[in-house]
Amino acid sequence: MLENINREEIVLWNELRKGNVIALGRVYDIYIDDLFSYGMQFSEDRNYVMDCIHDLFLDLYKYQSRLSETNNVKYYLLKSLKRKINRKHKEKATYFNNDVPFKYVLRSHVPSPEEELIAIEKAAQKSQSLHKATEFLTKRQQKGLSLRFNEKRSYEEIAEIMNTSVETSRTIIYRAIKSLRKNIVLPLLFLVKVLF
């Protein structure tokens, strides 16, 4: 029985490598609990762990043609998640661990009026693109995406606002992103820039 499950997962993995979004979703569904439990061993921040998992699955989709074959999908994913969590921890540590006070780092660069105008125009363009891309989503999915990416809310806050569980709020956002990938003609890299 275990051998059949392993074979099914390898078939899913190979489909994922060919660009099959449904296979990506199935791999996510199969391993999300294991990945979350494993990730929590390296960080106590639930949101951070979930962000790393979502980053991992975005990478799997973006770099699907470069993924290597594996006989153990679970091990591959756990190892990749650990690397991603550790890399992001190092980035955080590098950013904050220097001799210059944090307040000074934030204030050392004052944007010019042109830079501010460009930033405002980019933000408006992203917002417009995101709105147009999400028109076909359900109202619930639109609200979830807006809370997560426009208002930068945590999954716990989203769950409270939408009167759902944290897991349901994650599922709503995951399915919305999955739906965007499936139904939008825009290149994935553009979508990722708009959403993240």
Image: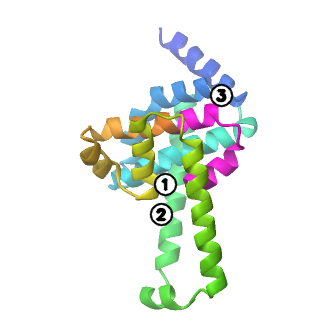
Q: Is residue 128 left or right of residue 163?
A: right
From the viewer's side, name the closer residue of 145 and 133: 133
Q: Is residue 192 magenta?
A: yes
Pointer 1 residue: 85
Which residue is found at the position 47% from the left and 91% from the top?
Answer: 104
CA distance separating discs 2 and 1: 6 Å
Tell me which numbered mark, 3 or 2, is placed earlier along the sequence. 3
Pointer 2 residue: 89
- Evaluate whether residue 132 shows in this view: yes
Which residue is found at the position 63% from the left and 26% from the top?
Answer: 13
Mark drawn on residue 111: none
Q: Secondary structure at mark 3?
A: helix
Q: Quadrant of residue 69?
A: top right
Q: Please, what is the three-letter code of the amino acid marked with disc 2?
A: His
Q: Please, what is the three-letter code of the amino acid marked with disc 3?
A: Leu
Badge 2 crowding class, 10 Å Cα cut-off, few under 14, some 14 to 19, many 20 or more, is: some
Q: Position of residue 119 (x, y in %)?
A: 61, 73
Q: Which residues are magenta?
A: 177-196
Quarter of the picture containing the C terminus is bottom right
Q: Position of residue 191 (x, y in %)?
A: 63, 48
Q: Position of residue 143 (x, y in %)?
A: 40, 44
Q: Please, what is the three-letter code of the amino acid marked with disc 1?
A: Ile
Dots 2, 1 in contact, CB < 8 A: yes
In the image, farthest residue toward the right: 65
Pointer 3 residue: 16
- Evaluate whether residue 42 shows in this view: no
Badge 1 crowding class, 10 Å Cα cut-off, few under 14, some 14 to 19, many 20 or more, is: many
Q: Position of residue 165 (x, y in %)?
A: 26, 38
